[in-house]
Amino acid sequence: MAANGKAALVTGAGKNIGRACVLGLAEDGFNVAINGSSDRAACDRVAKEAEKFGIKAIVVMGDVGKAAECKRIADEAIKAFGAVDALLSNAALRPNKPFLEMTDAEWQRVIDVDMNAAVWLARACLPGMVNKGWGRVVNFAGMNAIHGHAGRAPVSVAKHGVWGLSKALAMEFGPKGITANTISPGPIAPDVEEKNASAQARAQTLARVPLGRFGRPVEVAAAARLLVSEGGAYINGQMIQVNGGGAT
C-alpha cells in the first residue's frame, strides 16, 4: 500500500507533464496507474522511476478517446489499488488544421480525447471516491481554453469543456468530500510545439511571459501535487494557470 494509503490514475503519463505528475505523486506516497496510448516503453520507464519512491506503479495502456477503453483503464487501476483516489486527466491531442478543412471525424476525435475522456474516466472513478468520502479530480486545459487559437477550434472547445466539467463536478461532489479543479499550463518545455517552433515564434511566445522563459513540467506537476494533497482540500472548482504570468 502507498505511504499515504491512496492511489492516482494519470493519463498521457509517458512523458512531459504527465510523467512529472506521476513522479511527483509517487514522491508524495501515491500508488500510481500510468496510462499511455502507444509508447509502452516510455510508460514502463516512468513506472520504474516512480517505484524508486517505494510505491507501487502499474502501466495501463489504452486509448482514452474511446468510452469502453476509459472504463477498462479505470477498472484496471481500481482492481490494482482498490480505488482511484486522484484522477488526473492529462492526455490530449492538439492538431493544427483550418476549421473549414476539418472533417467531422477529425473534430470528434479531438473532442473525445481532449474532453469526453475526462467525462468517461470521472464516471468510472467517482463512485469509489464517493464511497470513501475523499477524492480529487484534476483536469488539464491550457492556453487554448483561455483564448481562441486559429487552426485549433476543436481543442479550444474541448478545453473549455473540461473547465466547465471541473466546475460542475466541484459543485455536485464537493459535499461528498471530493474536489475538482483545472490546471491550465502555459508554454512548457519540452513541448513539441516549443521544440519545433521557429526562433521568431519562440521569441513572440516568450515576449508574453513576464518570467521570460518556458515553464518546466515539474512546475505544472507542483500545482497538481497541491490540488491532490490535504493542504489543497479547500481549493475546489478553480482553474490554476501555470504560465509564468501572462502567456494565456
Image: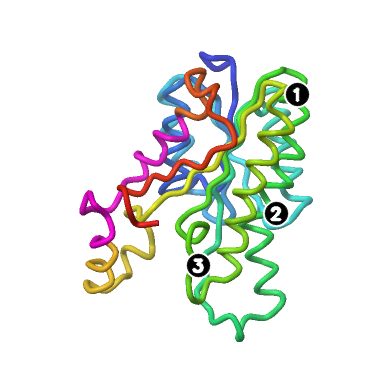
Q: Which of the pair 161/220 is nearer the observer?
A: 161
In the picture shown, does residue 167 fall above or below 248?
above
Q: Say what amino acid the circle numbered 3 marks.
A: Gly
Q: Which of the pair 85/223 is nearer the observer?
A: 223
SS of the residue at dot 3?
loop
Q: Are marks 3 and 2 in contact (CB under 8 Å)?
A: no
Left or right, 241 with respect to 212, comes to right
Tell me if residue 161 is in the magenta stretch. Answer: no
SS of the residue at dot 2?
helix
Q: Say what amino acid the circle numbered 2 marks.
A: Asn
The residue drawn where x is 66% and y is 29% is 84
Q: Residue 43: x, y in percent?
A: 50, 44
Range of magenta residues: 206-225
Identify the residue under disc 3.
148
Q: Residue 146: x, y in percent?
A: 49, 57
Q: Which of the pair 54/150 is nearer the observer?
A: 150
The residue drawn where x is 71% and y is 38% is 74
The residue drawn where x is 49% and y is 43% is 183
Identify the residue under disc 1.
130
Which label sits on residue 155?
none
Identify the residue under disc 2.
116
Question: Which comes before the other along the chain, label 3 or label 1?
Answer: 1
